Image (cartoon, grey):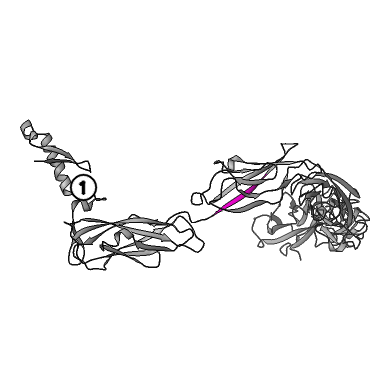
Amino acid sequence: MWNQFFLQEEYTGSDYQYIGKLQSDQDHGDGSVKYVLSGEGAGTIFVIDENNGDLHATRRLDREEKAFYVLKATVVNKWTGQKLEPETEFIIKLHDINDNEPKFSKEVYTASVPERSDIGTSVTQVTATDADDTMYGNSAKLVYSISQGHPYFSVEPNTGVIRTALGPGDMDREQREHYQVVIEAKDMGGQRGGLTGSTVVKITLTDVNDNPPHFTQSIYQFRVPESSTSGSVVGRIQATDKDIGQNAEMDFTIISGDGMEMFDISTDKETQEGLVTVRKPLDYEKKPSYTIEIQVQNTQEYVRFVSSGPKDVATVRLAVDDVDEPPVFKKASYLYEVKEDVAVGTVVGSVSAMDPDRARSVVNYSIDRRTDRGHLFNVYPMNGSVFLLKRLDRETTAWHNISVVATELNNPRQSSSVSVYIRLLDINDNAPMFASVYETFVCEKTKAGQRIQTVSAVDADEPSSGHKFAFSLAPEETHHRNFSVRDNGDNTAGILTGRATYSRLHKSVYLVPVVITDDDYPMQSSTGTLTVRVCTCDHEGNMELCKPEALSSSPGLSTGALIAILLCAIILLCKYDWICKQMYILQTTRGHCLCLD
């Protein structure tokens, strides 16, 4: 096919490189035809002999820069310039030679693979490319090989996949963690004469939990004061683990010993140390030492490498140090009940404390006066009996909360206190009384037995069976028959009219005495007074008019007394002595001045 020519790249000869010959049917060999070339590189890269159509390349060409050129050729009459044929397009293709070495996508690769992986575990894949023509010959056919990294790793020749070459026993991170592998890629299918490129692969073995933790000692010894509170740190236990990160996190436990109930062990998340702490209060006098067996293991275990053997165990010996402790009360608090009418000096109850130390120092008792500001109680210093200093009243204060202090006689700085709760029991020492001040009215025209008021009572005492009050009219009032009292049986009573008519002119205010009695022992009673005003009412019983003094909150002065006071004021203002001489002044029992003619 004349319209396609081939030219080898990278020509090194000194002459122009011959490509081929163009021949036209119009060329009869008489020298009248001229060959003309146009297109890519015409006249510079490519030239044509205008007389015979020979085509040459003027310089060295690189296929990797440009793989082919498109040109056009025609023939014209040498003398007239007339085209003898239309232009015809043709292509010059460059034949590839192996002039490019393989190149990897990275100069340095980084990869990782878990330690103790099986043989053939994939680590990573490297990739190289060759700029030569993959469609022509073997110039771009690559083969991978490993030049550094034996015997730990291998590479697949055709894919560049790197795999482990040794078994789990030989790939141990704790022995060696980092590897540097050199991979080569060779073209020409790996044959002799091929070009080679290389890259570095840095491989790290990642950790798996293949090592159990171990104690740094088989026996640990600590001392702890008996006064240590719950949660106090006694000591730190160290253990080591060759693994790292989460695979080295540890869990400590107590598995046996006489101190299992008294101590705890936990893990310090920052240092991975075991923290031995106090769990319950210690008492040197009861037990001066303890021994516990502890165990350590990883919090996360890799099932593949879990050892069937026992976990690492160590012994911890704990010696309790004696300290001078304050007295200890037999109870956390005391509760006593006493009647409110007990006599001064009566013992309410007793408290007891003792020195827990071996010395058993003598204990003195006292009242914390901050809890007994009124000095109502005291305590016998030697035996702890709490007694009464003043009389008590339940209705004033039903509960008393005081603190009793126990102090060592030989060391007053050692003291402790306990709460004593004293509940006063009620006795019937208060009489019932009206629940409020009762005032009411009665119409001048009413009917006998009409209820004009309901009254109730209150009592400061609190009998266990509840209040029960009885109401009655005072004996001195029963013969008047103005009003009566009806006990309702529910701690209330009704005040009833004793007749059908009342006269406010005759008497405008009645004071009705009501006796209220409780049913407790000893029985208590009081008399309450109900104020009743006489008023004019409408036919429905609604109050219309009462005397002025009946409208006040108390009976007050009578009408006659008010008139007398008014006359006295007039006489005092008199200007003439002869008027005053005809009058005299009488002082009444109420202290009002009566001026009489």
The answer to whether one can see residue 16 in this image is no
In the image, residue 353 above or below residue 449? above
User: Where residue 273 sits in the image (x, y, percent)?
Assistant: 81, 48
Q: Between residues 352 and 6, which one lies in front from this camera angle?
A: 352
In the image, residue 411 above or below residue 148? above
In the image, residue 255 above or below residue 590? below
The answer to whether one can see residue 463 in this image is yes
Image quadrant in which the C terminus is located: top left
Residue that mark 1 sits on: 557
9 within the magenta span: no
Quarter where residue 86 is shown:
bottom right
420 within the magenta span: yes
Q: Which residues are magenta?
A: 417-429
Quarter where residue 250 is shown:
bottom right
User: Where residue 234 sits in the image (x, y, percent)?
Assistant: 80, 46
In the image, residue 190 above or below residue 589? below
Is 311 situated left or right of 373 in this image? right
**Which amino acid, mark 1?**
Leu
Image quadrant in which the N terminus is located: bottom right
Q: Secondary structure at mark 1?
A: loop
Q: Main secondary structure of the magenta part?
A: strand
Q: Between residues 39 and 162, which one lies in front from this camera angle?
A: 162
Quarter where residue 169 is shown:
bottom right
